[in-house]
Amino acid sequence: MSHLDQLAHLERGCTKAEALAFYDSLEALHVDSLRGRWRGRGLSTGHPMDGLLESSGWYGKQFDDLDSVHPLLFEIDGEIYPVEPQAKMPVDVTKRATRHGARLRNVDHRGVVTAAMIYDTQPIIDLFRRLSPSTLLGLMDARGMSEPYFFILTRDEELQ
């Protein structure tokens, strides 16, 4: 079964342990392969954040270069724009970002060096593993959150 087939199976419903085992089975990626805009969606594991970003109009993320990342893009009424990262949920989408809010680094996570996005103003690190050249599994590690939040990113082909 391919990684994309496994993901389709997990998207029908999975536990945190199943999502973590799948994440651990995927290959690492280097920060250079992230450049561009990516569409996001959550992977439901019973996490308290499941569905919250999507219900607010979450579009995804945009990686411009190592030190210039928009960690939260939202789409409202057909307009895609960056929003300032916030500690509370749901996200207040009226707080448009006036600058980039994160940076990229390769970090050691769970024994594997892989690409990570480090927020500038929140105690959050998003870590990424590759399913295919255009699909990633993300794991959000946030201080104060007892378990990771999982999400999927798909390269926005309209910009390529």
Image (tube, grey):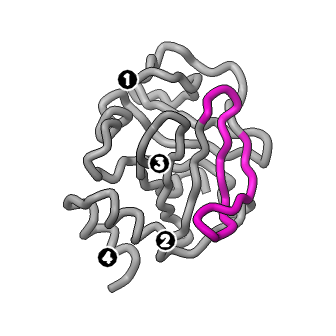
67 and 19: which is toward the camera: 19
Q: Amino acid at mark 2?
A: Asp
Would you say residue 122 sits in the magenta stretch? yes
Q: Which residue is mark 4?
A: 5
Q: Amino acid at mark 1?
A: Pro
In terms of sequence position, does the residue under pointer 1 or pointer 2 come before the other? 2
Rendered position, 38 above or below 8: above
Q: Which residue is mark 3?
A: 39
Rendered position, 140 above or below 17: above
* Secondary element at image label 1: loop
Q: Which residue is mark 2?
A: 24
Rendering coords of residue 136 (x, y %): 50, 62
* Secondary element at image label 4: helix
| Stretch of the chain drawn in magenta | 103-123
Q: Amino acid at mark 3?
A: Arg
* Secondary element at image label 2: helix
Nearer the observer: mark 1 or 2; the answer is 2
| Residue 90, numbered label | 1
In terms of sequence position, does the residue under pointer 1 or pointer 3 come before the other? 3
